[in-house]
Image: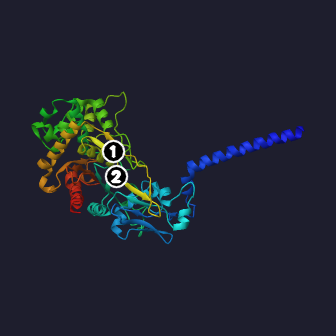
Amino acid sequence: MKMITKRGIFLWILSGLFIVGLVLMTVSLVTNGNDWVMKRFNSHVYSDGELIGAGTIYDRDGDVLVKTEDGERVYADSATTRKSTLHVVGDPKNFISTGVQSVYSARLTGYNLLFGVYNIERYGRGNDLTLTIDKDICDVAYKALDGRKGTVGVVNYKTGDIICSVSGPSYDVEDVPDGLDTNPKYEGVYINRLIDANYVPGSTFKIITSVCAIQNIPDIQERTWVCNGKYQPEEGIAIECNANHGSSINFKDALAKSCNSAFAQMAIELGQDKLSKTAKELGIGSAVSVSGSINSYPGVFDFEDNKAMPADLLGWTGIGQGNTRIAPVTMLRIVSAIANDGNAVSFNIVNSLANQAGKALNLNMPVNKISLMDSAVAGEMKNMLRYNVTEWYGDGNYKNLNLCAKSGTAQIDEVDSHNIAWFTGFMDSEEYPYAFVVVIENGNSGSHTAGPVAKKVLDAIIAQ
């Protein structure tokens, strides 16, 4: 009898352990199933390390960017499109971590907990994904970059839909160049420079300093500053300006002419606490989320806690030449908020997902709107950015765009050709509510190098 009792207890323990193990396995399957199915040794999904089991990816007009055909991934017919959309779509081996083929790999294969990858076996491919980008606009942007390293991004500031995201250098996945991983020409080729790169903002940071000044200096619009070609703080090295702007340059002209002397004095008067607070509120130091699944480089605004910044470094920071580093998409979000009465909407690059039968599937995309600044502040900034174009860059150079913009030339060293060229802003238009950012490495002047690229892309949008 005692032996039977012991055996019974043992069987109960064994049964309990089996049930616990079954529960743990089920939980693990639910939690990690996507990761398991996307392992490269899964021959249903990968062949020779390349994704083959995914569905078709379309641009917003229904043009095919990549599809599965006879067990292989086949990319767009146009070599230009293959290059211009590379960093959005992703490469065959998923080296580009922000590409939708990598981020949405499980959704593209059609994997689900109930049927696994049965749909791939049945249909020969997974689910279909439609993006918000426009391949034709991306092609224009890629050609405008003309082989230079940098990025072009365009977003609808009302809806948050990104219609253009181009990064250079790029390459043709159907004709991979020799030395892709060793040739300096392709350095950083797997980086989406709109989202993952970080740059010194140069004079585009004067947008942030301007917002801070409007928020904290009541008579800022009536103020004037002296500029004799440089500004010498009470301590530290002098801050050189790009010109001698005279003895009474006002706020509006200081931004339009990008006067370093005036903005250095503004930054020092504001102080690091107020400037840091505004930078944080505008998103510098926080990642920008795209479609809720792709997160940008968060940015760095280098003010050490409880440590006073020297006046000269504070001045340099206020003109965008300090230790600040941001992703271009962060600046794109800031100018989008200015265009949209101070409100930043969620950025999105994915429009819809459908199964093999064409039935829409729920993507659960986040949709929100966050106030980055008061609408009155946004209104003042919009007027000033418009004034930049009409009085400085030349409205005739940007006909029919109703452009509001700011250029930036971030100096990396003493050689002008090594500068980072920026141009960012938006069209103040109900019909074309688009914000943009252009960054070109080794680009010399922002307005002269990045400005024409922005013009070509925005003209193409209007011409559609």
Q: Residue sitting at 34 percent across and 62 percent down?
A: 84
List x then y, in percent, for residue 64.
Answer: 38, 66
Q: Nearer the viewer, residue 23 or 261?
A: 23
Question: In the image, what residue occupies the spot 12% across and 32% down?
Answer: 222
- Mark 2 = which residue? 194
Q: Which circle marks residue 209 in the picture?
A: none
- Identify the residue at image location x=22%, y=30%: 216
**Which residue bears the numbered disc 1?**
326
Q: Earlier in the sequence, mark 1 or mark 2?
A: 2
* Dot 1 amino acid type: Ile
SS category of the residue bearing label 2: loop
Q: x and y percent of residue 289 in the render?
A: 38, 46
- In this rendering, the answer to whether 74 lies above or below 360 is below
Q: Is residue 206 above or below residue 457?
A: above
The Cα atoms of the two marked residues, 1 and 2, are separated by 10 Å
Q: Position of residue 73 (x, y in %)?
A: 46, 67
- Crowd class of label 1 (few under 14; some 14 to 19; many from 20; radius 10 Å): many
| Number of marks present in the image shown | 2
Identified by mark 2, the residue type is Leu
Give the side of residue 10 with respect to residue 163, left or right. Answer: right
Q: Nearer the viewer, residue 240 or 105?
A: 105
Image marks 1 and 2: residues in contact by CB distance under 8 Å: no
Numbered disc in front, either 1 or 2: 2
Q: Residue furthest right?
A: 1
Above or below: residue 280 compared with residue 85: above
**x%, y% of residue 342?**
26, 40
Which residue, as the protein is rendered here, is positioned at the far bottom? 70
